[in-house]
Amino acid sequence: MITPHNKATLQLSVVLPAYNEVSYLHLAVEKTTQTLNSLTDAYEIIIAEDGSTDGTAECAQKLTQTYPQLRHIHRTQRLGRGMALNNAFEQSHGEILVYMDLDLATDLKYLKPLIQAISVEGYDFTTGSRMMPQSKANRSLSRGFSSQTYNFLVRHMLGSKLKDHQCGFKAFKREPLLELLGKVEAKHWFWDTEIMVRGHQQGLRIKEIAVEWHSGKDTKVNLVKDSWNMFWQIIVLWWKLHKK
């Protein structure tokens, strides 16, 4: 059990970014609630819903009536996954802030070590990794090759030590994360990489943990388009970090 320091203080905030996720939403909230109930009695779950058009917003609002720890933040227009995360974290109340992809691609049994890396071991950030020797990642050869190439470029161009920057399974100590959010410019997928690279640049302690991960059937990643966009953002961030 992860015991809060003060019962009056909400210890844990878990953000589930959502864009057209109506088919995943109910099960994700149910499983996340069950897992969190086994870890702590002081938590909130935030659905950071970003201009969905498939009924996700209506489903999320309905679920708040069933799950008292659940909050729904709605945007009428889609601004991007990174912007949705920024907004949710700024409105959160927890001492430890977590976000997970709503399809629960990462096995929830790793939520406890993800959180304890911060609450017990004292790290500032921690992230799941699909690229460590102990990791088990079920994905196509093309996505695996693209991910390996991308992470190689991030390490060698941006100075990161991580093996996997884009796994949607991360936890943060509240204060250092909120201090960094104002510097992070990525509005969509590149948010994960930028927050980790800037954290490393600031000298924060970051831990990477091996996880079991299964690719979602309805992934919103466009391999060609998003890979090119992410590569370009590596170049832009490299320039910003090195021109100082």
Image (cartoon, grey):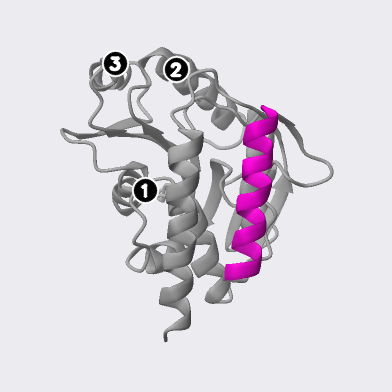
> In the rendered structure, which amino acid carries the disc numbered 3?
Cys
How far apart, in angstroms, are the residues tagged by discs 1 and 2?
Answer: 20 Å
State the SS at label 3: helix
Does the CB distance between marks 1 and 2 fall below 8 Å? Answer: no
Few, some or many residues within 10 Å of mark 3 (<14, 14–19, 20+): some
Question: Is 50 part of what is drawn in magenta?
Answer: no
- Residue 85, placed above or below residue 242: above
Question: Between disc 2 and disc 3, whose residue precedes?
Answer: 2
- Residue 10, placed above or below residue 213: below
Q: Nearer the viewer, mark 2 or mark 3?
A: 2
- Residue 238, placed above or below residue 101: below
Depth order, front residue of 98/8? 98
User: How far across and how far down the image is residue 181, in percent?
Assistant: 37, 62
Q: Which residues are magenta?
A: 139-157
Which mark, by number, is residue 59? 3
Q: Is residue 236 left or right of residue 161?
A: left
Q: Nearer the viewer, mark 1 or mark 2?
A: 1
Q: Residue under label 1, please give it.
A: 82
Question: Is 155 part of what is drawn in magenta?
Answer: yes
Q: Residue furthest right?
A: 133
Identified at 52% across, 26% down, the residue is 32
Q: Residue under label 2, please give it.
A: 24
Identified at 67% across, 54% down, the residue is 117
> In the rendered structure, which amino acid carries the disc numbered 1?
Gly
